[in-house]
Amino acid sequence: GDLLDAGVNRSPSAYLNNPAEERSKYKYNVDKEMTLVKFVDDESGPVGSFNWFATHGTSMSRTNSLISGDNKGAAARFMEDWAEKNGLPKQTGVASSDDLGFLHMTSVLPRRVSTIIPEPDEITDDLMQLASSYEASGGRRLAGSNITRRIRSSQENNAKFVSAFCQSNCGDVSPNVLGTFCIDTHLPCDFNHSTCNGKNELCYGRGPGYPDGFESTRIIGNRQFLKAVDLFNSASEEIQGKIDYRHTYLDFSQLKVSVSTSTGGPQVVKTCPAAMGFAFAAGTTDGPGAFDFKQGDDKGNPFWRLVRNLLKTPGKEQVECQAPKPILLDTGEMKEPYDWAPAILPIQIIRIGQLVILCVPGEFTTMAGRRLRDAVKNVLISGSNGDFGTNIHVVLAGLTNTYSQYVTTFEEYQIQRYEGASTLYGPHTLSAYIQEFQKLATAMVENKEVPTNIQPPDMLEKQIGLLPGVMYDSTPPGVHFGDVSSDVAANSNFRKGTTVNATFYSACPRNDLLTEGTFALVEKLNGNDWIPIYDDDDWSLQFKWSRPSKFSPRSFATLEWTIPEDAASGVYRLRHSGASKPLIGSIKHFTGTSRAFAVR
């Protein structure tokens, strides 16, 4: 199904360099189609879904310093919340969408829902009085970190619905759908170079929640979620047939590729050793670069041209790669200290009945992905003697198995916008992928094995870590880890949609990442017990860690909870948990809570 408002082309001038006849086959300059697979268990009913849709995970601006799954992660969180609300997995095989608006049809903030706490029949001042009787707990040591796992571990034996929002040919697709504008004049950016008065650094894309990056992330995630639910509930074509795959490794730095010349005749060319053009340093409208680099400029500015000439390093060539490239990346043998780009890459085809997944180790642009899908589809249909019918579904899974930057068409490469400048193996990179995937597809339909004669080098012993370890954590005299530094105001009550926060004396989160746990909880009073309701995986709750200065051993954790519109009224508090490292001794876990407050 088509999702029209979750992606736009961020390099339209490069797209327009593709042949007009080819472009005329498509209504849009980005792929709008989402393909979804629904997994149904014989006993439990629907247990999950995977979908593929092309849009970059760049709704969060580069000024965001919080760990985030961006719009894809938000969409997955929303759909798994929706599935839990609808009781999935369950015995029946049909999910109800009656409560679709429960989270996302408006601007409400989603979260997992606890069904064990009833809604109070009547809200009175007694609620505030009850809240006022619970002061901040003060920090205390824990024997371990188990307390931080309660919200998940309580249901760890139950089957969980799994939703994956997978990436596709997103290379030139931006989620910032309102367009690109200059931050100084608020006028549209230059079309060809994405600059503002010649300056690359001033041109930014705007998401639908502009200027709020979090809201843009929620909206784009929500749009993918809503389309996925629509496809999930209407899925009717059962997957049937063989399960199969083909996989191989290839040295993309020196592949011989057969291409057609301008006169239609065959020509053998080669891919290039990995290199990046100047324009890659310009960044994109999702995150501009610096130093006056420009997209669509393969020469660089005068200063960098001078540097290049002094180094005797030619510019990135447009047709062949017989001469050295700028920013050469020696690949494979680690002969150079700046070697980091892979030369040996995996490619893979997975077949599940009439669904075929092309696993590519990079970010294909829209037209590059279309060409690859069509080429493989033609081989499968024409060579399979009916094993593959016209109902075959071919999806491209981007950024799969490893990462090797971008892949553009030959024509887009000539324009040298960010994606073309980031196509590592030269102008014939896409032709190499198409040629080699056709070989995999042929091997699949002919039921032949694909030999793998090379393996990627083992780089584990050559990794360099520049982040120093945690020296130690400390608090002021008389203060414990987990104590509140800035508490919720006494006798506070908050309405839904508003934000409540508290700051705690904390320690470096790298002491224990609390895997399968959480640094932040929102707890609700139920009788005499505090029940965890939200954690830092929920969209409504943010955990912000900071130091007062770069080398200070002291640190703080701020918990910010934007109260969902459908949160139950009652008495709540915030809980922070973590782990501290002394100068001498072992890491110790701690926890602490804020003062209680009422939600009306």
Image (cartoon, rainbow, N blue to C red):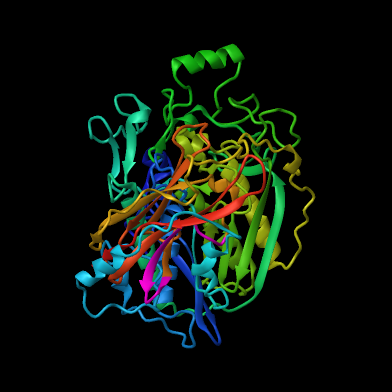
Position of residue 587 in the picture relative to residue 251 (left or right): left
> In the image, residue 379 lies at what x, y percent?
60, 62
> In the image, residue 534 lies at what x, y percent?
41, 64
Position of residue 405 in the picture relative to residue 102 (left or right): right
Residue beneath the point at 57% across and 45% down: 430
Position of residue 314 in the picture relative to residue 207 (left or right): right
Let me know if residue 498 is in the magenta part: no
> In the image, residue 94 lies at what x, y percent?
43, 84
Find residue 192 and report its image quarter.
top left
Q: Nearer the viewer, residue 70 or 169?
A: 70
Q: Nearer the viewer, residue 586 or 238?
A: 586
Q: Quadrant of the N terminus?
A: bottom left
Residue beneath the point at 45% across and 69% down: 80
Magenta-colored span: 516-530
Vertical relation: 172 (above or below) 40: above
Vertical relation: 135 (above or below) 548: below
